[in-house]
Amino acid sequence: EAQVTQNPRYLITVTGKKLTVTCSQNMNHEYMSWYRQDPGLGLRQIYYSMNVEVTDKGDVPEGYKVSRKEKRNFPLILESPSPNQTSLYFCASSKSGGGTGELFFGEGSRLTVL
Amino acid sequence: RKEVEQDPGPFNVPEGATVAFNCTYSNSASQSFFWYRQDCRKEPKLLMSVYSSGNEDGRFTAQLNRASQYISLLIRDSKLSDSATYLCVVNPDNYGQNFVFGPGTRLSVLP
């Protein structure tokens, strides 16, 4: 089954404790991205990647890191989480660059930072 | 001004009603437009792309007005299963896939 898989789905952590949210897709998609969704603000792009070893900042990259060492994986790293990073996170992938590709989303990871 | 704006709703309509959602975008150079649907506590899924000439998919019709920087979604004969949040999505250019999402409009179809 074609899918985007995120882990963990739910996480409660404390300020400053490094964490990684994994994202994997099995569709051989070149493009992957991370979003956060907050009430009233919609989805905002954190980082995106056009291909292996190619990453770029989205609209809200502060406090996050990403890497794209393999085509299928695109982990999101919070080196020192803070309460304002409490949010619902979505990973997404698309077949190729360009604005016509459908975005396929993972089921989301709900993160709470205390 | 936000890049993509939508009326947050909620829109509460009876089954069988016709409902229209509007969306405005600020970047006049935007190239690609979409409507996504998001069910409660679920991930967004593509509903339909929006083409310059307008397009229809069953009960759903999407329209684009580039001059007014305005996108619309019309749902005819609403079903209970149409209850969801509808996200307007704009890609400012055809490269880099820097999609910009609107905050969404919530629809509740009532029996």
Image: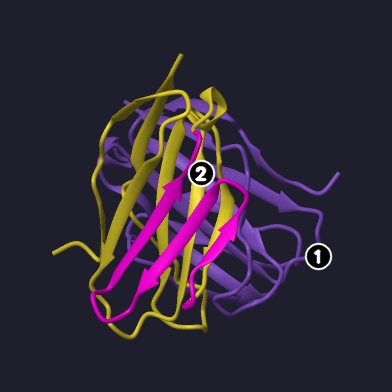
Residue beneath disc 1: A28
Q: Residue at x 71, y 57 (%)?
A: A73
Decide whether residue B56 is among the magenta residues: yes
Alpha carbons under labels 1 and 2: distance apart: 24 Å
Q: Chain B shown in which color?
A: yellow
What is the magenta range?
A: B52-77
Mark 1 touches mark 2? (CB < 8 Å)? no
**Image-based side of B39 in relation to A41, left or right:** right
For the residue pair A96 and B14, the one nearer the viewer reads as: B14
Q: Position of residue B4 (x, y in %)?
A: 28, 62
Decide whether residue A40 is among the magenta residues: no
Q: Residue at x 41, y 32 (%)?
A: B17
Residue beneath disc 2: B37
Instruction: Using the image, determine if residue B71 lies above or below residue A43.
Output: below
Q: Position of residue A34 (x, y in %)?
A: 51, 56
Q: Position of residue B56 (x, y in %)?
A: 57, 59
The quarter of the displayed image where residue A58 is located: bottom left
Residue flagged by tag 1: what amino acid is it?
Asn
Residue flagged by tag 2: what amino acid is it?
Arg
Q: Position of residue B34 (x, y in %)?
A: 49, 62
In this picture the colour scheme is by chain
